Amino acid sequence: MRFLVLGAAAGGGLPQWNCGCPNCQDARSGKIAPSSQSSLAVSADGERWAILNTSPDLRMQMQVARPLFPRTLRDTPLQSVLVTNGDIDHIAGLLSLREQTPFTLFGTREILSLLSSNRVFDVMNPEKVTRHPLVIGEPFPLLPALQALVFPVPGKVPLFMEDTGSTIQTDLEGEQTVGVRLDDGKTVAYYIPGCARVTDGLLQQISDADHLFFDGTLWQDDEMIRSGTGIKTGQRMGHISISGPEGSIEALKELHCGKTFIHINNTNPVWQPDSAERAYVLAQGWTIAADGMEITL
Ligand code: MLT
Ligand code: MN
Ligand code: ZN
């Protein structure tokens, strides 16, 4: 199984357009590498590819992703797209895939109904782009040689669907936020770019992983408040943090497989090559995704 990280950053990217935090300034000055928003390409044969989540940066990502280049006049190695939730950073790229080339769009009924309730997504010609609703836990061919299934992970409704005035449950387990299991008959990988909490059920689900791509949004829960960039905690956004006794490194330490943080917020200190936080993550056996990174299992 081959992976190509199209975008390693969380919603907003690195730098984020309106952010002057040290990471964003360093990404502008070239001190650290900029990163585009959340998307991962996968292939079982290196010829046919699927994209897991489509960010607003998709057009630019596909411009440099050699395996996704057209081979003939009108063509694409892209066969399917799967979206794991309805957040902007995961669905807005669909609008860049509107040029009459067939592919299959996979998502849970809830996520697909969010798309069908907004007519702007009808620019993906329904005669060319088949929308295939997924049943939780039911395997399906994401690509001819790649079986996949989706499972609920604790999360919340997309930010733009939050009702003001009502309490938002941030660790709902249902169809609005899912993880993906990928199986090519040789290796098994999981992709979970958004997750509020590592439950026993989730640990059980991913116990057969050869590789895990996991939510690396924040280093610590109050990071955005501390840095003065926002007022929300990670928990409020439906994202577990990397560090601490409640964090993902601790929760996933008994999972012995390749582990990669992806969907990393612009405030996260792991972006800095020389940071103690990055060194710690690497010492714990994790890798940190970067745009253009390839992982072959
Ligand atoms: C998230 O992952 O929390 C979302 O992408 C937030 C957003 O849509 O800005
Ligand atoms: Mn996001
Ligand atoms: Zn910033």
Image: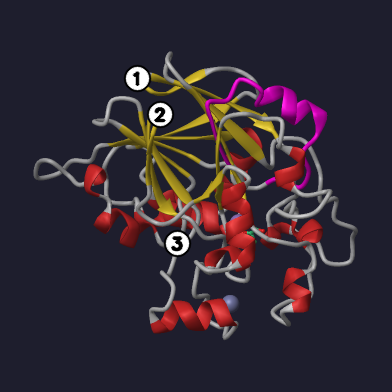
Which sits in the foreground, 131 or 277? 277
| Residue 100 left/right relative to 279 | left
Given the image, on which type of amino acid does mark 1 rest? Pro
Q: Work out how far the residue at label 2 is from the one at label 1, CA to CA, in angstroms.
A: 18 Å
- Provide the residue designation for mark 2: 297
| Residue 283 left/right relative to 246 | left
Q: Label 2, secondary structure: give it.
A: loop
* Residue located 58% across and 68% down the image: 275
* Residue located 61% across and 20% down the image: 208
Percent across and percent down for residue 27 are: 45, 77
Percent across and percent down for residue 262 are: 54, 51
Q: Label 1, secondary structure: give it.
A: loop
The stretch of residues the image draws in magenta is 195-213
| Residue 232 left/right relative to 180 | right
Q: Would residue 154 be visible to someone looking at this image?
A: no
Which sits in the foreground, 213 or 118? 213
Q: Quadrant of residue 179?
A: top right
Q: Which mark is residue 144?
A: 1
